[in-house]
Amino acid sequence: MAEKDYIQGATGPWEIVIGMEVHAQVASKSKLFSGADTTFGAEPNHQVSLVDAAMPGMLPVINGFCVEQAVRTGLGLKAQINLHSVFDRKNYFYADLPQGYQISQYLQPVVGKGELLLDMPDGSTRMIGITRLHLEQDAGKSLHDQSPRESFIDLNRSGVALMEIVSEPDMRNSEEAGLYLKKLRTIVRYLGTCDGNMDEGSMRADVNVSVRKPGGPLGTRCEIKNVNSVRFVQQAIEYEARRQIEILEDGGKIDQETRLFDTGKGVTRSMRSKEEAHDYRYFPDPDLLPLEFEQGWVDGIKATLPELPDEKKARFIEKLGLSPYDAAVLVAEKESADFYEKVAKGRDGKLAANWVITEYFGLLNKSGQSMEDFVITAEKLGGLIDLIADNTISNRLAKDVFALMVETGKDAATIVEEKGMRQVTDTGAIEKVIDEVMAANQDKVAEYRSGKDKLFGFFVGQTMKLSGGKANPAAVNELLKKKLAG
Ligand code: ADP
Ligand code: MG
């Protein structure tokens, strides 16, 4: 591990250790044990069945679709699928939990050990272990900000299916934690098992943080609950690690506790001391049979998995010649990867990647539009790249053409024709321009010839300028070298 990954304290370097529990809402129209609707944004308490409200005598009925999504997600995380798993009751009291217990899985979850690969900015990868994935129902929501005197309960979320995905304590800094969350979101989106919309609460992270002296035993952790954005996860980790280091360096000890991240102040605050499994008195839910799968059923789901981001990235590197970094950027969203593939089809993969990543996304972001609505289609961008590839325009000039394409909605060939932007490759014409530049700068020519090589760039610039940016840069370079040599 590199020095830079340590935090320097008064007593020397410290290492941060992070493990995450992510709650991902299953992309399902109905809840885990009832037929109630799950659409986001409904009026409070308008999507609550008698089961979700925990009316006496109601019985949960397992939603097979949700189970299938959990298995699908497990397969996407290259994890062990357990053919036998059990639903348990996790008992606790809270106003937004009318049953008095949450139906979850404990000792026998549906998915066991798996792995997730982080794509680091330097192009390398890092493997993070997945401990397990289990299915559970969400609780309702307490609303404390509607009235100064009362709290309200909205049970729309009560009973919604969640996949809790638990990682090993394998992350070492906030950057890795952010990459982990993003990669997990990418994977569930590719699989279609969760929409990954963190601002709608479809993905929430409990972040476990501890610190230790490098190579020492694991420290006591604190768990920061329900963090709902990548940025907040990172801020919470940085604050929490420093808080713990300060306590330890002052000779104190860390209490294992559950904390909340105050997004306004950027600090974590104690919520309650950590509860242990026995506090919840887990036991198998007598209303539900264990889940039993046949291997053939699991294999059938496996056969329907799409090409996942890691595989797509490997293919982009091997078959299209991309750098690991560019490939990782493109596969992060399936929509971008698909767009890129359309642009690259039958063209130079690397040139297409540069244009998609830098120019296309640059102007798309500036426009504030979605890829779907943006005037530049894959076909139009492809047309522009074709003009670069056949030397009709230089890469430099292509950027101006691209800006005009966005502005006017016209295709590249039309703009080049209308504006006479065709690149000058005729060496005679370029030589004429160079002669003019040299005649106007005889002093600089003399300096160059007496050894001031740096002036070469000046001559290139002047020649390009005088040609209106249309001279072929390679030809300009070659001809200038010859002429300046005298
Ligand atoms: P619980 O459900 O009680 O929070 P788990 O054993 O399931 O307990 O662990 C929860 C998370 O805490 C896991 O993601 C795990 O990787 C992480 N974790 C465990 N020990 C540490 C530690 N010392 N420092 C940081 N994270 C840890
Ligand atoms: Mg926990």
Image: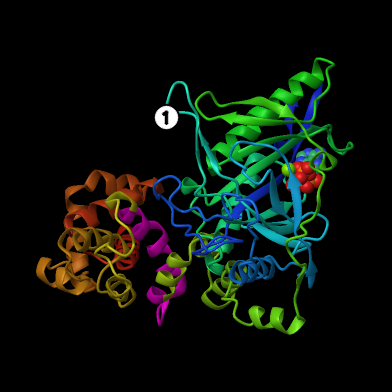
Q: Which residue is mark 1?
A: 146
Tell me which segment is drawn in magenta: 342-364
Q: Quick check: can you spot residue 1?
A: no
Q: Quadrant of residue 382?
A: bottom left
**Rendering quadrant holding ligand 1:** top right
Q: Nearer the viewer, residue 204 or 347?
A: 204
Q: Establish if 254 lies above or below 72.
A: above
Q: Establish if 228 lies above or below 389.
A: above
> Residue 335 placed where, x, y %?
43, 66
Residue 82 relative to residue 481: left or right: right
Residue shown at the point (62%, 43%) measured from the top left: 97
Residue type at mark 1: give it.
Gln
Q: Residue furthest right?
A: 217
> Residue 440 placed where, x, y %?
17, 49
- Characterize the magenta stretch by its predominant secondary structure: helix
> Residue 193 placed where, x, y %?
56, 65
Q: Establish if 231 lies above or below 254.
A: below
